[in-house]
Amino acid sequence: MEKIISYPISLISMLLFLLALVIFHPIQWICFNVFGYQAHKKSVDYLNLVLLRIGHLLGNTYKVTGRELIPQNVPIIFVSNHQSLYDIAGIIWFMRKNHPKFVSKKELGKGIPSISYNLTHGGSVLIDRKDPKQAIPTIKKLGDYIEKYKRSAVIFPEGTRSRTGKPKEFAQTGVKILCKAAPSAYIVPITINNSWKFVKYGFLPFGLGNRLTFTIHPALAVKDYTFDEIMQKTEQTIVNSIEL
């Protein structure tokens, strides 16, 4: 019954989603090329707010806890599980004060209005998951960036999103490179729940009436732990809060 009800709402939501991407693409271009970084960032922030609001049409709601735990004026490495596109929209909007930049796959760097433009011009980095030699210096570049500007990197160490909410094994390489490049950074684990239910039926229809939660956990100073310790603590913290 949910799938039947969801089809017309999903089609409307998809149309609005695509329309938002198309409308904000030239807005981003103008902001970036005429007014610079801060204006471009604001345009990206509000694009993602619009995308979250479109989710409300599907009965989705959002809850964020722990934002007060994020250290200020220091580099941040957000490490999170990954369940759907709405993970990214939520992190961009709810953590906007920290200027989040993403480690993304290179395929997203072209052909998608707004999204591709932001990834290629907003400070994020694109990696070829089939070419580790390319990925290492690219991720290091992001680490150097957040260390210099005291902004934040976002990495999903599962590599790909979980379609059932069950976490995949965490890869360590990307997080390790960021830690080495940004030694004054703090790792902030994030657990995302119920985002996968938005796409539980596949591309269409969307899932209805889901409560997406973003739980921000206490920060871990990179300098206070060995990498093995910090990775173990981070993974355990995230996984232990996933609701299955």
Image (cartoon, rainbow, N blue to C red):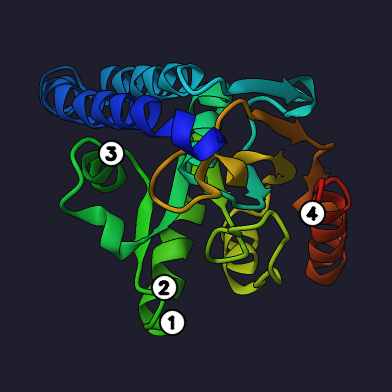
Q: Secondary structure beneath disc 4?
A: helix
Sequence-wise first label, 3 or 2: 3
Residue 135 tag number: 2
Separation (CA) of disc 2 from disc 4:
24 Å
Q: Name the residue under label 3.
A: 118
Horizontal and vertical percent position of residue 15: 24, 28
Q: What residue type is labelled 2?
A: Ala
Q: Mark 1 points at which residue?
A: 132
Q: What residue type is labelled 1?
A: Pro
Tell me whether the residue at label 4 lies in contact with that at label 3, contact meaning CB atoms closer than 8 angstroms.
no
Horizontal and vertical percent position of residue 192: 69, 41
Residue drawn at 58 percent across, 56 percent down? 156
Q: Secondary structure beneath disc 2?
A: helix
Residue 223 tag number: 4
Tell me whether the residue at label 2 lies in contact with that at label 4, contact meaning CB atoms closer than 8 angstroms.
no
In this rendering, the label closer to the viewer, 2 or 4: 2
In this rendering, the label closer to the viewer, 4 or 3: 3
Tell me whether the residue at label 3 lies in contact with that at label 2, contact meaning CB atoms closer than 8 angstroms.
no
Q: Secondary structure beneath disc 1?
A: helix
Separation (CA) of disc 4 from disc 3:
31 Å
Question: Position of 80 compared to 43: left or right?
Answer: right
Tell me whether the residue at label 2 lies in contact with that at label 1, contact meaning CB atoms closer than 8 angstroms.
yes
Sequence-wise first label, 4 or 1: 1
Sequence-wise first label, 4 or 3: 3
Separation (CA) of disc 2 from disc 1:
5 Å
Where on the picture, by quarter, is residue 180?
Answer: bottom right
Q: Secondary structure beneath disc 3?
A: helix
Q: What residue type is labelled 3?
A: Asn
Separation (CA) of disc 4 from disc 1:
26 Å
